[in-house]
Amino acid sequence: MIKPSAKLSPFQIWILAIRPKTLPAAASPVILGSALALRDNQFLFNLAFATLLCALLLQIGANLANDVFDYYRGADKPGRLGPIRVTQAGLLKPSQVVMGIWIVFSVAALLGIYLTLNAGWPVLFIGFFAIFTAITYTGGPKPLGYYGLGDLFVFIFFGPVALCGTYFIQTGQVTLDALLISLPMGFLIVNILVVNNLRDIETDRLAGKMTLAVRLGEKGSRTEYLVLLVAAYLVPLGMWLSGMVSPWVNLVFLTLPMSYRLLRSIWRDRGKPLNLALAMSGRLTLFFSILFSIGLLIPA
């Protein structure tokens, strides 16, 4: 049990538990999907705001679930390389974290009901499977993250489902534009997971957590990061060259210096130094989504 050198207030402990640095992953596809709805003159602030809150709560619930379920499975051990896990560190009891999960997902479900009443039953279907996947990522008899399926499900839910769902809630439809624009979000958010799992390859292997990074190895994981990063930039470029969007979407290339620094870190660093790359990958996703949004909204 880890004893922090300085006493933390309950509020500070719960902030550690929800892991704020991961929240750009939840916000980015909602921001970009709402920008697309605004471009198409169908933006609805109340539904966009409710969707954003729901997405953030789902991410927080998933973080809490990962914290307690990894603890139960023995995946988090003393000497952990990543940020503090509150259950393993003894800052919160497992029962407290489980109660937090129930509260967060209950509020998310209430928001989901509101969105369903305004946008139709598909939203209820999406919300149910989002919560189910958030729990079974590290929980249940066969957790997705322990069988190398995390990358796939993160791509699906943080890419097409999150962005197209946001657009559908406000417009009642899913367009080819929405589907294509969702791809860079999926790629970049998967990369956040790639960094996390690359850092933890050795400890995950020892714990029997067979993530895709464990299966691919360090070189394979770094190659995965590179391929997904390049693909994220090729999508807006390809959409512009095909005449689907204005050239302003190429504002996303202003993030290339950040991407270059990230790639240097990914190919050079191991262990704890990758925590910085993890946070930077989240920021890259957020900045990319904001610049892509601005590009969509500026007239050609």
Image: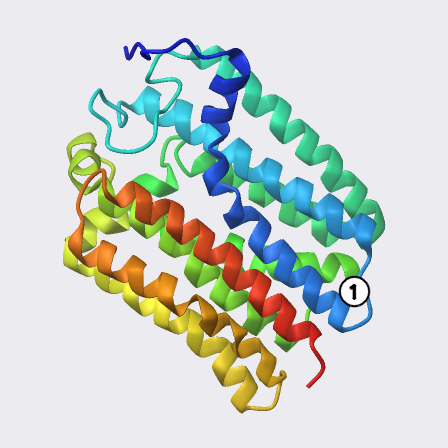
Question: Residue 232's x, y, as percent?
Answer: 43, 69
Residue 205 relative to residue 143: left or right = left
Residue 155 visible to the viewer: no
Residue topped by disc 1: 171
Residue ID at (55%, 91%): 242
Q: Quadrant of the C terminus?
A: bottom right
Q: Quadrant of the N terminus?
A: top left
Q: Is residue 299 above or below residue 192?
A: below
Which quadrant of the figure has residue 71?
top left
Question: Residue 36's x, y, as percent?
Answer: 69, 68
User: How many numbered badges does the structure rendering display?
Assistant: 1
How many residues crowd around disc 1 within 10 Å: few (fewer than 14), some, or many (20 or more)?
some
Residue ID at (33%, 18%): 88
Q: Is residue 144 above or below residue 189?
A: above
Which quadrant of the figure has residue 294?
bottom right
- Residue sitting at the far bottom: 242
Given residues 120 and 12, the one toward you in this image is 12
Given residues 91 and 4, the one toward you in this image is 4
Residue 267 visible to the viewer: yes
Residue 123 relative to residue 257: left or right = right
Q: Is residue 63 above or below residue 22?
A: above
Residue 187 relative to residue 205: left or right = right
Q: Amino acid at mark 1?
A: Thr
Q: How is the image coloured?
A: rainbow
Residue ID at (42%, 39%): 137
